[in-house]
């Protein structure tokens, strides 16, 4: 009978531990999804568990610290880690903007040449009805 009692106690403790882990993980996910700053205090409060328990679980502790550090580095509106732009994505956007800038500069140069050519033709054959055109520098 005594052995059976210990087995039930161990089983209950294991179930309580797993339930507490599930609560902590769920609180972490919700805080990250909402873009809220992650701290041990907030996770414990949202999960309804103790902060000291969070410190005893190495994987949960590491995830809280990782998310906390990630949200501390941002100074703008907090975005969930899963929704933040990667370095590769940011590089691709930068390359696209640089290419667009290059094309606009080329178009600007082409239009300046066309304008200079049109103004040059106007000077070569002056018309009595034309007035002097002044173009400001760009």
Image (spheres, grey):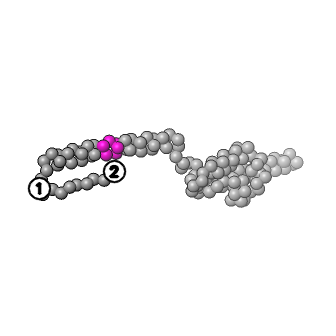
Q: Nearer the viewer, mark 1 or mark 2?
A: 1
Question: Can residue 118 be seen from the camera position used here?
Answer: no
Mark linked to residue 128: 1
Of callouts 1 and 2, which one flags the residue occurring earlier in the amino acid sequence? 1
User: Which type of secondary structure does the marked residue at label 2 adopt?
Assistant: loop
Residue reaching furthest to the right: 2
| Image position, residue 3 (x, y; %) | 86, 45
Bin the neighbour count of mark 2 within 10 Å (Cα to Cα): few under 14, some 14-19, many 20 and up.
few
Residue 107 painted magenta: yes
Residue 93 painted magenta: no
Which secondary structure dominates the residues rendered in magenta? helix
* Left or right for 131, reference 3: left
- The image shows residue 130, relative to residue 97, as above or below, that is below
What residue is rendered at 20% in x and 45% in y?
120
Magenta stretch: give its range. Answer: 103-109
| Image position, residue 54 (x, y; %) | 74, 50
**Cβ–Cβ under 8 Å for marks 1 and 2:** no
Bin the neighbour count of mark 1 within 10 Å (Cα to Cα): few under 14, some 14-19, many 20 and up.
few
What residue is rendered at 27% in x and 46% in y?
111
| Residue closer to the observer: 81 or 112 | 112
Question: Can residue 24 be seen from the camera position used here?
Answer: yes
What residue is rendered at 13% in x and 50% in y?
126
How many angstroms separate mark 1 from mark 2 (CA)? 28 Å
| Image position, residue 11 (x, y; %) | 77, 48
| Residue closer to the observer: 98 or 83 | 98
Q: Which residue is mark 2?
A: 138
What residue is rendered at 72% in x and 47% in y?
61
Q: How many marks?
A: 2
Mark linked to residue 118: none
| Image position, residue 5 (x, y; %) | 84, 50
User: Which type of secondary structure does the marked residue at label 1 adopt?
Assistant: loop
């Amino acid at each position: 009978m005594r052995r059976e009692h210990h087995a039930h106690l161990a089983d209950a403790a294991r179930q309580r531990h797993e339930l507490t882990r599930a609560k902590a993980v769920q609180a972490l996910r919700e805080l990250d999804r909402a873009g809220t700053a992650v701290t041990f205090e907030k996770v414990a409060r949202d999960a309804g568990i103790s902060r000291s328990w969070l410190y005893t679980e190495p994987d949960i502790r590491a995830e809280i610290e990782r998310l906390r550090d990630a949200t501390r580095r941002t100074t703008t509106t907090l975005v969930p880690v899963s929704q933040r732009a990667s370095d590769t994505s940011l590089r691709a956007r930068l390359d696209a903007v640089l290419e667009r800038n290059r094309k606009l500069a080329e178009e600007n140069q082409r239009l300046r040449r066309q304008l200079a050519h049109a103004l040059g033709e106007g000077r070569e054959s002056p018309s009595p009805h034309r007035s002097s055109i002044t173009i400001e520098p760009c």
